[in-house]
């Protein structure tokens, strides 16, 4: 049997879908048999091409995604790196909205109150209310200044201030002129030397300061003897000091118990007078510190 050439044959197009292929037909009822080998080869070629297109498309998609990421990174960092100032493109603090959308809370500045000045409490009788006596201002039976021990002797307390001044000097007049209200005395001794400390009390610091300024070399406190301490500095030359702190003016007179005159070489007498003057200042200041501390804790 031979295949004739009959009428026009329907052609199979490998690139068209099956639904668009022309049906097979034959003339005079003799149809040609399809070339199955050619069809199989065409189908394989089409499948390979489709796979290549899929692989190529996937690669292009991967490259596109990578490029997009790179562009995003460059967009995020490129400007700051180019400008050399990472924060140059950031909005200022005032431009950044707060999380709550409202104004930041503000707080009034607070400061601790200044500490109380101890001197204020011994500068006026209005604040200086603590008890006062020779035993309070000069407690105990002895005191030590540095390496020197002083034994406490007699004490005295009077409201007649002029009576506590040496009658041959000018101190009584100065005390009266500045309205001295009270005068306390105490004597300390050490190895042949005696020192009397006198504390004049006024209502105000101004009165005490004025007393100090008006006192001269003849403004001498009367030495206090008794209780085993012999009279001293009633005629011989003695060393004296004058000072003030707050509403208190304080004086010292120091000399030898045996009646010898004090000279420039009598260093132990000078140091003894300085020690007792310093101790008196510390006691008056401690008085102010104690009252300031009590007021601060009220």
Image (spheres, rainbow, N blue to C red):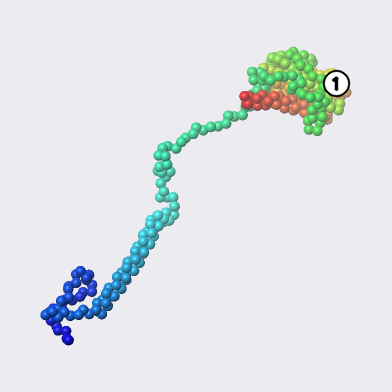
Residue 256 position, x and y percent, is 85, 24
- Rendered location of residue 246, percent (x, y): 67, 23
Percent from the top left, x then y, of residue 136? 74, 22
* Residue annotated with mark 1: 229
Quarter of the image containing the C terminus? Answer: top right
Give residue 183's quadrant in the image: top right
Which of the two residues, 228 or 73, is positioned nearer the viewer here?
Answer: 73
Residue at position x 80%, y 33% in the image: 147
Q: Say left or right for 187 vs 106.
A: right
Is 26 positioned to the left or the right of 181 in the image? left
Q: Is residue 16 above or below residue 81?
A: below
Tell me the quadrant of the picture where the N terminus can be found.
bottom left
Q: Identify the residue shown where x is 27% and y is 78%.
A: 41
The vertical placement of 172 against 15, above or below, is above
Is residue 57 at all visible to an observer of this figure?
yes
What residue do we see at 82% from left, 29% from top? 149
Furthest residue to the bottom? Answer: 1
Residue at x 36%, y 64% (from the top left corner): 62
The image shows residue 160, relative to residue 61, as above or below, that is above
Secondary structure beneath label 1? loop
Image quadrant assignment for residue 14: bottom left
Residue 129: % across, % down:
67, 19
């Amino acid at each position: 049997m031979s295949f004739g050439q009959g009428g026009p044959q329907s052609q199979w197009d490998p690139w068209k879908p099956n639904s668009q292929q022309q049906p097979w037909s034959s003339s005079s009822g003799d149809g040609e048999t399809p070339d199955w080998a050619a069809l199989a080869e065409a189908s394989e070629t089409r499948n390979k091409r489709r796979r290549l297109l899929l692989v190529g498309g996937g690669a292009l998609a991967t490259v596109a995604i990578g490029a997009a990421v790179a562009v995003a990174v460059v967009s995020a960092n490129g400007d700051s790196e180019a400008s050399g100032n990472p924060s140059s493109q950031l909005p200022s603090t005032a431009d950044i909205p707060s999380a709550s959308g409202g104004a930041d809370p503000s707080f009034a500045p607070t400061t601790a109150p200044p500490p109380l000045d101890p001197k204020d409490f011994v500068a006026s009788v209005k604040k200086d209310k603590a008890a006062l006596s020779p035993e309070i201002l000069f407690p105990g039976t002895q005191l030590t200044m540095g390496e020197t021990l002083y034994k406490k002797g007699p004490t005295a307390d009077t409201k007649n201030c002029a009576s506590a001044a040496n009658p041959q000097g000018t101190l009584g007049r100065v005390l009266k002129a500045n309205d001295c209200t009270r005068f306390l005395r105490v004597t300390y001794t050490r190895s042949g030397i005696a020192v009397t400390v006198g504390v004049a009390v006024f209502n105000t610091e101004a009165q005490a300061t004025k007393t100090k300024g008006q006192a001269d070399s003849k403004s001498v406190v009367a030495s206090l003897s008794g209780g085993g301490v012999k009279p001293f500095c009633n005629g011989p030359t003695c060393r004296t000091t004058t000072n003030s702190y707050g509403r208190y003016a304080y004086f010292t007179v120091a000399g030898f118990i045996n009646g010898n005159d004090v000279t420039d070489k009598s260093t132990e007498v000078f140091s003894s007078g300085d020690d007792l003057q310093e101790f008196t200042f510390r006691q008056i200041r401690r008085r102010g510190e104690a009252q300031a501390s009590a007021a601060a804790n009220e």
